Amino acid sequence: MDYFSEGISQLIEQLQVLPGIGAKSAQRLAFHIISMPEEKVDRLSDTLKSVRKNIRYCSECFTLTDSEKCPICSSAKRNHRMIMVVETSRDLAAYEKTGKYEGVYHVLNGAISPMLGIGPGDIRLKELMRRLEGDVEEVIIATNSTLEGETTAMYISRLVKPTGIRVTRIANGVPVGGDLENIDEVTLLRALEGRTVL
Amino acid sequence: MDYFSEGISQLIEQLQVLPGIGAKSAQRLAFHIISMPEEKVDRLSDTLKSVRKNIRYCSECFTLTDSEKCPICSSAKRNHRMIMVVETSRDLAAYEKTGKYEGVYHVLNGAISPMLGIGPGDIRLKELMRRLEGDVEEVIIATNSTLEGETTAMYISRLVKPTGIRVTRIANGVPVGGDLENIDEVTLLRALEGRTVL
């Protein structure tokens, strides 16, 4: 890219590394950033640096946050006796967007995957079991519906059951608004198995 | 986004302002950035700030650059007697990618648009005319093939003709690899008018 000046080329190169940003979008982004008011760029630059610097895991649920405890674990409005186990902070965010879940979370930061050599000791399972020593009524397993997610769900349910705490798994089924003809057979069968009386 | 900590929410908000980055990509980007090595994030942060701070127009062709003269205007390998007039630095980049153009550029940083109230005085036309007082053989007008681009092209050709310098316009036609049935009538007619003998 020697037709751009050194600085612009560097910016484009560094933006290109980000997920979902190809050569063209990186160029578009770079030129947009160049034309932004300088104080906005400075603010973005400072935010990037400080968020990365201060990032850590919540001491309770292990979601990514920048304080010792995340906003959800710190909230008195949440039901701390109901724990939803998710793989990542993004999964947590997905459930939070529904606005209907009132419990707290436990973020495993991964899933058991023999293929990738990720065992039970590599995700936050010990920490989950430690939380269950407290006053907990239900553990809702919301790991992904993938091989790794299902393996992890099975593993957790086997760990938790002996404690007597209720363990549940989120349902499989047809997505709302989903067209039956475009849905795979396994999902269709799960939806049938999980049918409810009207 | 009160389910994310303050810092993460701010980062997502600020990323969302960028072109082509919606709520979901901003979240994905933010989490990616958080998981990047800290020194890489620091480097990106510093590049953002310094590029924005040092950005200026090349004193000769008015492309965006971070030195007094851009790499192309500084190059002795380029033919400085052939000037291609483009609307933006991104258009310049598009032609540079062909790797075949050996002349230099003049970046108008806009196009005449009565609709948007952009007149000839608002783009770098005076500066172009000043360059033509030097030793110039040809002015290639490569403004966009839009109403504004065409208006600007007409205006420039009328300005330049009296100087006796050759003025040309890049061709309209069927894009290479383009399927005739998907191309609009105006382009098809232009392609017909511009036909060449084989």
Image (tube, coloured by chain):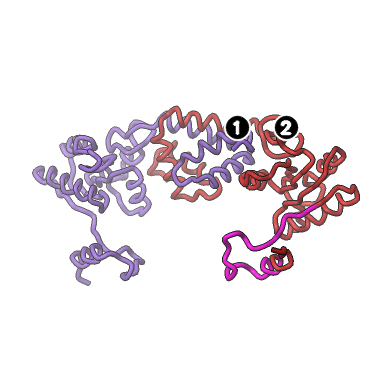
Chain colours: A purple, B red
Residue type at mark 2: give it.
Answer: Ala
For marks 1 and 2, give the one nearer the viewer: 2
Dividing the picture into quadrants, the one containing residue A41 is top right
**Pointer 2 residue:** B76
Q: Foreground residue, A102 or A58? A: A58
Judged left or right of residue A153, residue B127 is right
Q: Identify the subunit bearing mark 1.
A: A
Q: Foreground residue, B56 or B101? A: B101
Tell me the SS state at disc 2.
Answer: loop
Judged left or right of residue B178, residue B4 is left
Residue A22 percent coordinates (x, y): 50, 46
Q: Residues within 10 Å of mark 2 (few under 14, many from 20)?
A: few
Q: Identify the subunit bearing mark 2.
A: B
Residue under the image location 23 percent in, 55 percent down:
A170
Range shown magenta: B168-190
Judged left or right of residue B150, residue B52 is left
**Pointer 1 residue:** A7
Residue at the limit of the structure toward the right, as seen here: B162
Q: Name the quadrant of the C terminus of chain B.
A: bottom right
Residue type at mark 1: give it.
Answer: Gly
For the residues bearing labels 1 and 2, Cβ distance under 8 angstroms: no
Tell me the SS state at disc 1.
Answer: helix
Residue at the limit of the structure toward the front, as seen here: B198
Residue under the image location 19 percent in, 38 percent down:
A120
Residue under the image location 8 percent in, 44 percent down:
A162
